């Protein structure tokens, strides 16, 4: 068999050099086929076909064993042929080798040639292959007789880990029947990578495991054999683990994972390492397994907050329940070691601890009580997170709550000092009050602006922060404003601003800076004559705006008086002899009855003096007009040179028979000591009544012929003439006139004897009917002169009265026509007419009552403004015209 085996493997002895030679030989050489590291080919040498098979390793080994060189190769051809022939004749075993995983159709060997069959003989003799109990992966090609690969060759499937791996085949050949044994060795190639039992392996390690702790690992396996199955291990780089693959023998290798550095699950809870196994093939193949190392937790970490200090700003008016902050802690441990709860362990200030609460599970800090920036600006809370490990660990953080000020406090104003009352003569800049202003808020909310209302006469002066002085900026006048209600308004700078108002009552004390002042400089008082002694004539009133003693006024008659009237010869008399003034009430009273005929106007001054220190005074002029009463009857004037006047006279006169109608034969003269209407006289012919020859002028008193005289009228006419005034009631006087009817010549002589106007004669108490004497003639002449003067005066007054009457008819009633000067009055009443001009300017006041009169007499005494022209004063002032008429 050894010789047969040697004959069956001649090609193996040639090695690489023989293969090169075969490939580089003559033209009939077949190309060499290479498959999976093996070669096969044939070459014709000296007419013999030599089949050979080459496996890389065996070829080299055989070449080295033979030790032949290139020069000896030619001699081997003959040896091979001899051996081949001997093997074919002896019937031995043919051995081939083929690498696994060779492709289908790969020629394993030239079986027909190796068996010594000629061309075509293999097919003719039915060269065939018989397998021994297993599926053959090779077959004999019928035409060529070559042994070729028919299906996939997998050494590991065929032989597993056994070595060598050979396929033992029987080859049958007919005619004659021959049996040949063929052995095909399937050589291993590195077609299997090392394999671990699983793709990954989980390993659990406590994080507090000691260093150099060893954790066994399961190695890999390789289906190949030989060097292809020689495994080496490597571990991916790791800071904490290393691989210990020291083995006690070549066949037994133990793998261990060694802990080289302490573990920290919180830093890295899982380590992923790759364990690689490399075989010895060329190229080497690698198998890997993923080592997943889970680090088991121990309670070695306290909860950690994501911030050591939480800063929060919260307005002081935040509502209860407001979320202040949400703290968050983490515990890198796991399981129960990771579970923790929150709590507030302390608060600064401690008194405000109840103002906050924290949720044990979520870490939400909420407001549970009111905040007040003015009490506490900042709160600091110490928060603890404690886990449930054994032993429990805790972490801490601080929550600083900065309270933001809101404008929730109005300014406050205090009066620290108040100096009242303030004298009205106080100097400017006098400090009235000291004020203190504050606002508990801060920033703009606590910045206060102050103002005073009304803005005058007081003002605010800032002395230093928060302090003000209320000072006097304008002069005071108590009489204008006696008390001030001062408001100090404070307003802060918040939005919206808050305000505070402090009211101050500042009374003004009085000084005697105002003299008493009468309502008008001149008072006109009308008083009827014949008043009773002590009768109140008027009430004077002076106003002093000061108060208390400075405004208490006392009255007195200062100066003034009047001269004698109507030739009484009594001389000048002071006003104090006529009137008096009540010192307290200012009532003007008459000390005695007044007589218009004695005193028409009394002018004097009344002084009003206050009780201040020094006292001040004011004066007013009082013009007292005595209003005439009809207390005097008309008086008939005596003849010239006669005695005094009387109320009854007997008169005589002469008239010519041939006197025409209207001829004045006499004139009755009468006067009335009264004035006005009371002195306005009218003449009436009482007897004879009817159609007599004479008539009397109503207002002239002239006796004239009413018609031409006739002899039937008789030699003498007796006339009874009544002189009556316009007073109420009217007073009268009577005169008896005897008219003698004479011839014209006698009448002319009578007229020439007494003068043109002296046609009236008479005597007091007695009369002469025979004719006038010398003394009577002289008296008659003097009387005529006075009669002419009286007529002229009356005429002038009549003209003036008519003018004033016409003006009064056109002017509004009870109206004053006045320029810039005080009013001047002209009044007409039942007591007469009078006018008065203070500054010689004229106004008109017409006051009529009852039926108007067609005749008006005017006189010009001084006259005050009537009540209708009282100047406009305050309601408490007395009227400017005090007209007190006392009817006796």
Image (cartoon, helix red, strand yellow):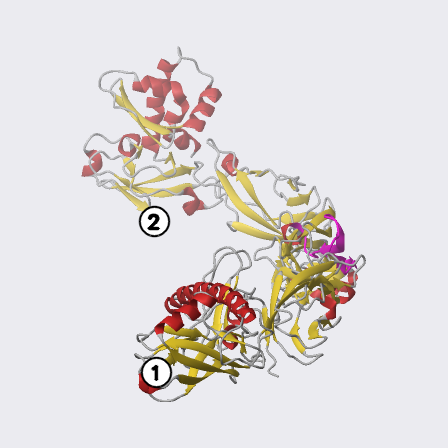
Choose between 777 and 441: the one closer to the eye: 777
Q: x%, y% of residue 129?
A: 29, 43
Task: Answer whether residue 22 is magenta in the image.
Answer: no
In this view of the protein, can residue 343 be seen by the observer? no
Q: x%, y% of residue 61?
A: 47, 25
Q: Secondary structure at mark 1?
A: loop
Q: Measure the C-alpha gap from mark 2 to mark 1.
A: 210 Å
Choose between 259 and 278: the one closer to the eye: 259
Task: Kindly identify which residue carries mark 2.
Answer: 135
Choose between 532 and 74: the one closer to the eye: 532
Give residue 387's quadrant in the image. Answer: bottom right
Choose between 831 and 80: the one closer to the eye: 831
Image: 198 above or below 691? above
Q: Which residues are magenta?
A: 416-443
Q: Is residue 761 left or right of residue 406?
A: left
Give residue 154's quadrant in the image. Answer: top left
Q: x%, y% of residue 734?
A: 50, 83
Instruction: Decide which of tag 2 and tag 1 comes sooner along the chain.
Output: 2
Residue at 31% of width from left, 32% of height from top? 109
Task: Answer whether residue 431 is magenta in the image.
Answer: yes
Q: Secondary structure at mark 2?
A: loop
Q: x%, y% of residue 19?
A: 35, 21
In this view of the protein, can residue 116 be seen by the observer? yes
- Identify the image quadrant of the N terminus: top left
Residue at the far right: name it: 613
Image: 435 above or below 525? above
Q: Is residue 665 left or right of residue 89?
A: right
Mark drawn on residue 693: 1
Mark drawn on residue 751: none
- Identify the image quadrant of the C terminus: bottom right
């Amino acid at each position: 068999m050894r010789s047969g085996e040697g004959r069956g493997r001649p090609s193996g002895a040639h090695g690489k050099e023989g293969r090169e030679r075969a490939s580089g030989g003559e033209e009939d050489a077949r190309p060499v086929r290479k498959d999976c590291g093996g070669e096969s080919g044939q070459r014709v040498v000296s007419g013999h076909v030599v089949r050979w098979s080459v496996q890389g390793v065996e070829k080299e080994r055989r070449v080295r064993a033979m030790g032949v060189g290139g020069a000896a190769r030619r001699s081997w051809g003959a040896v091979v042929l001899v051996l081949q022939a001997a093997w074919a004749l002896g019937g031995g075993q043919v051995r081939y080798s083929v690498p696994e995983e060779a492709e289908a159709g790969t020629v394993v060997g030239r079986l027909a040639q190796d068996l010594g069959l000629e061309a075509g003989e293999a097919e003719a003799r039915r060269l065939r292959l018989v397998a021994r109990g297993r599926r053959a992966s090779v077959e004999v090609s019928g035409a060529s007789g070559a042994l070729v690969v028919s299906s996939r060759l997998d050494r590991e499937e065929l032989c597993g880990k056994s070595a060598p791996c050979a396929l033992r085949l029987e080859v049958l050949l007919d005619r004659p029947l021959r049996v040949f044994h063929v052995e095909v060795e399937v050589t291993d190639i590195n077609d299997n990578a090392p394999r671990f039992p699983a793709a990954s392996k989980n390993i659990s390690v406590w994080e507090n495991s000691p260093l150099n702790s060893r954790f066994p690992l399961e190695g890999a396996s390789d289906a190949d054999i030989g060097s292809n199955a020689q495994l080496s291990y490597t571990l991916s780089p790791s800071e904490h683990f290393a691989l210990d693959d020291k083995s006690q023998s070549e066949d037994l290798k133990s793998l261990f994972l060694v802990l080289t550095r302490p573990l920290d699950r919180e830093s890295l809870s899982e380590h992923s390492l790759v364990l690689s196994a490399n075989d010895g093939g060329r190229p080497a193949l690698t198998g890997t397994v993923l080592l997943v190392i889970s680090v088991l937790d121990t309670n070695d970490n306290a909860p950690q907050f994501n911030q050591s200090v939480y800063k929060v700003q919260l307005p002081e008016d935040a509502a209860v329940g407001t979320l202040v902050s949400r703290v968050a802690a983490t515990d890198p441990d796991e399981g129960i070691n990771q579970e923790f709860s929150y709590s507030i362990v302390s608060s600064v200030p401690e008194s405000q601890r109840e103002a906050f609460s924290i949720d044990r599970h979520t870490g939400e800090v909420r407001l549970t009580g009111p905040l007040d920036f003015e009490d506490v600006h900042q709160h600091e809370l110490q928060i603890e997170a404690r886990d449930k490990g054994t032993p429990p660990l805790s972490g801490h953080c601080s929550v600083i709550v900065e309270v933001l000020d809101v404008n929730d406090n109005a300014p406050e104003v205090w009066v620290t000092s108040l100096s009242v009352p303030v004298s009205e003569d106080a100097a400017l800049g006098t400090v009235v009050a000291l004020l203190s202003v504050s606002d508990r808020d801060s920033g703009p909310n606590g910045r206060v602006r102050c103002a005073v209302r009304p803005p005058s006469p007081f003002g605010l002066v800032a002395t230093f922060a928060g302090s003000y002085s209320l000072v006097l900026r304008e002069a005071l006048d108590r009489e204008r404003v006696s008390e001030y209600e001062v408001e100090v308004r404070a307003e802060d700078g918040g939005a919206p601003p808050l305000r505070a108002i402090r009211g101050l009552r500042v009374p003004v004390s009085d000084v005697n800076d105002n003299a008493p002042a009468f309502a008008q400089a001149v008072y006109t008082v009308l008083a009827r004559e014949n008043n009773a002694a002590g009768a109140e004539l008027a009430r004077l009133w002076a106003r002093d705006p000061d108060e208390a003693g400075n405004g208490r006024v006392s009255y007195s008659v200062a100066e003034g008086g009047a001269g004698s009237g109507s030739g009484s010869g009594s001389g000048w008399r002071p006003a104090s002899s006529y009137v008096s003034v009540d010192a307290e009430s200012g009532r003007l009273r008459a000390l005695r009855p007044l007589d218009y005929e004695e005193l028409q106007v009394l002018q004097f001054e009344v002084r009003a003096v206050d009780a201040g220190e020094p006292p001040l005074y004011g004066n007013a002029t009082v013009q007292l007009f005595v209003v005439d009463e009809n207390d005097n009857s008309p008086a008939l004037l005596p003849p010239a040179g006669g005695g005094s006047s009387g109320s009854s006279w007997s008169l005589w006169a002469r008239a010519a028979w041939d006197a025409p109608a209207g001829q004045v034969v006499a004139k009755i003269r009468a006067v009335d000591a009264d004035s006005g209407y009371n002195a306005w006289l009218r003449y009436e012919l009482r007897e004879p009544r009817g159609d007599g020859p004479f008539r009397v002028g109503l207002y002239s008193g002239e006796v004239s012929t009413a018609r031409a005289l006739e002899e039937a009228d008789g030699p003498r006419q007796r006339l009874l003439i009544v002189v009556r005034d316009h007073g109420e009631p009217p007073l009268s006087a009577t005169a008896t006139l005897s008219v003698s009817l004479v011839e014209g010549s006698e009448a002319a002589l009578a007229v020439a004897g007494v003068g043109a106007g002296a046609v009236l004669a008479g005597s007091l108490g007695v009369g002469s009917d025979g004719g006038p004497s010398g003394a009577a003639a002289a008296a008659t002449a003097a009387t005529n002169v006075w009669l002419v003067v009286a007529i002229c005066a009356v005429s002038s007054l009549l003209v003036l009265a008519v003018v004033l009457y016409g003006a009064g008819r056109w002017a509004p009633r009870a109206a004053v026509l006045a320029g810039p000067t005080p009013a001047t009055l002209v009044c007409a009443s039942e007591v007469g007419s009078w006018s008065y001009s203070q500054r010689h300017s004229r106004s008109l006041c017409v006051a009529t009552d009852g039926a108007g009169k067609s005749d008006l007499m005017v006189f010009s005494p001084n006259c005050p403004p009537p009540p209708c022209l009282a100047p406009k004063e305050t309601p408490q002032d007395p009227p400017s015209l005090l007209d007190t008429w006392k009817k006796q």
